[in-house]
Image: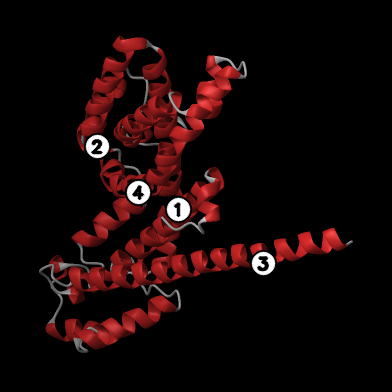
Amino acid sequence: MTALHAATAVRAPRRRRAAGRALRWAATRVAGAVFVLWAVATLIFFGIRLIPGDPAEAILGGPGSRATPEALAQARAEFGLDQPLFTQYLHELGRLATGDFGTSYALKVPVGQVILDGLGSTLILTVVSLAVAWLFAIALALWATRGGRVASAVSTVLEIVAAAVPNFWLGTILILLFSVGLGWLPAISTPGIPGLVLPVLTLAIPLAGFLGQLMRESVLNALDAPFTVSARARGESETGVRLIHALRHAALPAISLSGWAFGSLISGAVVVETVFARPGLGRTLLSAVLIRDVPVVIGVVMVVALVYIVVTIATDLADRFADPRLRQKGGDR
């Protein structure tokens, strides 16, 4: 019993320290998330007002509506646009803090409903694109490190070219090849898997180029590391060494990059959804900016920022799960 009590007394402080590190990590992430959301809301609020034009005209149907000065004045008063800019800013922050995004100027419906209508489509596009990019990157990395000098050179060229291709150019080429030329896939994104293929490839291929370069170098380094040498000495096959040991080690920096990658995919969705006429937050945001629908612009950007923050935190958790050293350090890097 004495030995058991001693062991318990040793483990208890360790548990308290681990819990304290976890709480500090969580508090840091929450504080950072709140700061980022405030900064995004501030930048987009003042930035959208630098665009020439009168928001009251957008409320009444745009410049072509020929609204009377009396109608414009009434619209400004109804939506608080006649108040000082800083007062409008504080009012906007107060509404956002309660989860109220306001009402769309153009559509005359709650912004939350507008966001919900497009959020699912954009999330499906970005999540599937990220998964496909990972599959391409893993395949390239394993082929390049197993196929010899020629495979390494070819994969290097493919990765560089893929990473440098703009989304709008790649989307156009894919439409010309698979829709116009071969007739295999629809040029306009339709419901179902066939309508998702070309938009996904347009987003995934450039990202796979970035991830592939990173993973190839990491796999090469891991294959010469002591833990892979020990695995070979224990009699494990070369395939097992690569898939179980080297690939897991190589995935760590790529996992860290996935948070940034998801954000880049969401921003790229604006172009892809426009090229393929696909409904989603990207097209909604672009339309709202063009007609100065301020509540929709702020709402969409805030939701995108929130999704990016959640994905970044999930990426940090995945890093901590994959690398025990981060858990021991409390996740500080």
Q: Residue furthest front?
A: 2
Do residues under tags 2 and 4 come within 8 Å of each other at their CB atoms? no
Tell me the residue at 40%/41% (across/down): 253
Q: Which residue is mark 2?
A: 167
Determine which of the numbered discs, if any, sits on residue 13 in the image: 3
On the question of residue 49 being in view, the answer is yes
In this view, the mark in front (3 or 4)? 3
On the question of residue 240 being in view, the answer is no
Q: Which residue is mark 4?
A: 260
Q: Earlier in the sequence, mark 2 or mark 3?
A: 3
Q: Disc 2 versus disc 3: distance between alpha carbons?
A: 53 Å
Where is residue 29 drawn, in percent x and y?
A: 45, 65
Q: Is residue 252 above or below residue 13?
A: above
Tell me the residue at 46%/50% (across/down): 315
Mark 1 Cα-neighbour bin, 10 Å: few <14, some 14–19, many ≥20: some
Q: Earlier in the sequence, mark 2 or mark 4?
A: 2
Q: What kind of residue is marked 3? A: Pro
Q: Which residue is mark 1?
A: 311
Q: Earlier in the sequence, mark 2 or mark 1?
A: 2
Do residues under tags 1 and 4 come within 8 Å of each other at their CB atoms? no
Where is residue 119 drawn, in percent x and y?
A: 43, 54
Mark 4 lies on a secondary structure that is: helix
Q: Earlier in the sequence, mark 1 or mark 4?
A: 4
Q: What kind of residue is marked 4? A: Trp
Q: Earlier in the sequence, mark 3 or mark 1?
A: 3
Mark 2 Cα-neighbour bin, 10 Å: few <14, some 14–19, many ≥20: many
Q: Earlier in the sequence, mark 3 or mark 4?
A: 3
Q: Is residue 206 left or right of residue 138?
A: left
